[in-house]
Image (cartoon, grey):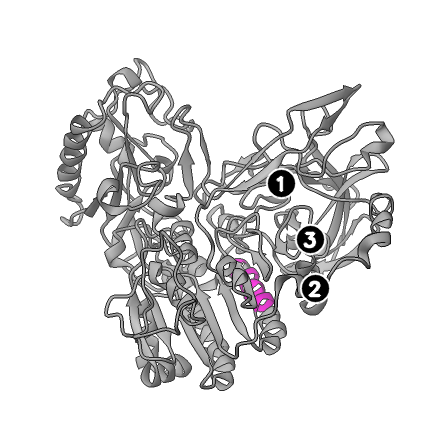
Amino acid sequence: MHPGCSLGYSPVAFRCPYILFVFLQDDGYYFRQGLPRIESLKKLTWILCILPLFAVVGLLPSCERARGEWRGGQRLVILGIDGMDPQLLEQFMREGKMPNFAKLAAEGDFRRLTTSIPPQSPVAWSNLITGMNAGGHGIFDFIHRDPKTLELYFSTSRVEGPKHAVHLGSWVIPLGGGSAEQLRRGKAFWQVLDQHGVPNTIFRIPANFPPAPAKGRTLSGMGTPDLRGTYGTFSFYTDDATAAPGAVEGGQVIPVQVENSRVVANLIGPDNTFRKGSPAATEPFEVAVDPLEPAAKIAVQGQEFILREGEWSDWVRVEFQLIPFFGNVRGMCRFYLKQTHPRFQLYVSPINIDPADPALPISTPSSYSRLLSDEAGEFYTQGIAEDTKALSDGVLDDKEYLEQARTVLAEHRRIFDAEFPKFTQGVFFFYFSSLDLNSHMLWRLTDPKHPGYDATLAAQNGSALEDFYQQMDQVLGEVLPKLDDHTTLLVLSDHGFGPYYRSFNLNTWLLNNGYIKLKADANPDSSEPLANVDWSQTRAYGLGLNGLYINQRGREPNGIVEPGATADILEREIRDKLLAVKDPKTGLPVITHVDLASEAYQGPYARSGPDMLVGYNRGYRAGWKTILGAFPPEELEDNTNAWSGDHCIDYRLVPGVLLSNRKIAAEAPALTDIAPTILAEFGIAKEKGMIGQSVFKSGRTPH
């Protein structure tokens, strides 16, 4: 399970012509229980709402004129490659497999880039975006907790619902709009560029959903939900009686029957918050299974297509109706026919937000996603597009997963090929996810020491990760010929990578060492976060991939540890004990570094996250269950999950990379230096709170 995948938004209501219901509602999102609704307008709504605007549109200045025009000639290209590891990069360059990177390193410069504390993608990219660490931008992990209730939530965005609603029979009509809030604090570097009239395009940068207000063109990346409001929930339809129906870690197994060579089932959409109880909206589809051939015809909402076993469909648009005649929302999905005989097995991808008709805001301006769709075809909008959970759950095998992952990269490269040639001035940032997600999933195929290593599978797909690296080299090869004296190039990654051999269950260790107490007769391995904890005798607890919290009086709802000197002494005691933990199987230290938030962070949010950041040794990581506050039986256990590589460890062990066509003056550049570097390239002084400096010897004269 990906961190936080059990915490869904469950989005769903829409902006409708409420005037037809004789109700008045402000524009905005409708959310229930802090979960977002999806915005969509029917054609009639557009006609009713937009026509009056034509009378005044001619009186308004153009957006371009209103924002000013930047007249400089300086250009900056940034390739953000999530998870590119310096050790692997150096190896592939030595072996002659990445000639363009080797050329850039030789003619320009190459440094290891200090990553964030902890080295998690939402934290790391927030460091880069704002020039601050977590103390300044407030993103500490994939998962945060409300200190007043200890409820878990996604770290990068939060939504709130309207205060009032009217019930009409079985319908719930909201009154007053809700709001969506991005929880990353601090100003994004492209917002500063906007203020100075510097044109910019920011493609899929993580930790930017909903998109920050911007004059430039942006498309949201990691953190963008699927149509159901989760990080990605697939559906798997099968008549195999041995497949347990219901939710699995990353999706749902849905039992079906094949009757007269036909299957009738439902696609599962977002929760319908217009109905009492908010049931999931569904849309039927049918599958006609060929009785002889390994093929089937799928029909959904008037669309028909044939798949053979082992084939993927193109994107298929689906509309989910919420209010008859008026309220619907459109998404899109891909079908994969895994098997027809002797068992029926059909995978359906998470229902993605359709970029041509986005149900939630995913770009600035809102038309940008439609433009990209028109130019380059439909593409995954879900922030974590590669379905790592389907592979971990065994729904997809390595070959099937790789085909899907290659499609994701092919989509990104098509968009890059469409957008990069248009770039003439300002900043062009383009993000690639493939190395990160595929390093997570394919490491076991490259490392015979891994508990999940399989020689047969390695022989079949062991070169796949290297292939993804070489595709990044091909992208760089498209950029290098376009560079000139007025163009600076930065190629960077947010962190490196390493093996994930063994899991350390932090909460189990805290329990065994007396820092956590459970209630009598409690089930320690409950799936509920921190279930049955006796808070009156608990001094510390773990949540998230690297976080450890002190149960402080006055902060936690049942805190017992006095803040100040008492809490400081306890932190240092726990740190010393954690650093002494050895793996009895290997004799290696499990944890090599523990940062105290009071020492690691600067800024107004320095004490809003974990009190301690646990830095695991290379080969170790927090176990999946302990991340969500559970207590597995063993403190240490082998990792046999397909998710076999990781970076959520001691930040010193997984630096990123930084390459440029200019000489880099900084001996130890860090992610927090990138935003000041970008601004300095255009003579813009760094913002208050930015803790980094330009990595070059000098920028242009600030103004």
Helix, strand or loop for the magenta stretch, by majority: helix
In this picture, is 59 found above or below 412? Answer: above
The residue drawn where x is 66% and y is 50% is 353
Looking at the picture, how far across and down is residue 118, in whole percent?
31, 49
Q: Which of pointers 3 and 1 lies earlier in the amino acid sequence?
A: 1
Residue 275 visible in this rendered orientation of the protein: yes
- Residue 472 against residue 595 in the figure, above or below: below
Badge 1: residue crowd in 10 Å (few <14, some 14–19, many ≥20): many
Residue in front for this viewpoint, 43 or 63 = 63
Asked whether 678 or 139 is in front, the reply is 678
Q: Which label's residue is closer to the chain start, 3 or 2?
A: 3
Q: Residues within 10 Å of mark 2 (few under 14, many from 20)?
A: few
Q: Which residues are magenta?
A: 401-412
| Residue drawn 36% across the image and 51% down it | 689
Residue 228, by quadrant, is top right
Q: How dense is the environment of label 3, judged by Cα within 10 Å: few (below 14), some, or many (20 and up)? A: many
- Residue 452 x %, y %: 35, 53
Amino acid carrying label 2: it is Leu
Quadrant placement of the C terminus: bottom left
Mark 3 residue type: Asp
**For numbered disc 1, what is the local secondary structure?**
loop
Q: Secondary structure at mark 3?
A: loop
Residue 31, by quadrant, is top right
Pointer 1 residue: 228
Residue type indicated by callout 1: Arg
The number of discs equals 3
Q: Which mark is residue 354?
A: 3
Residue found 29% across the figure and 75% down from its top: 697
Q: Which residue is mark 2?
A: 371
In the rendered structure, the answer to whether residue 98 lies left or right of residue 570 reads: right
Can the viewer see residue 313? no
Q: Counting residues from the N terminus, which is met first, the one under dot 1 or under dot 2?
A: 1
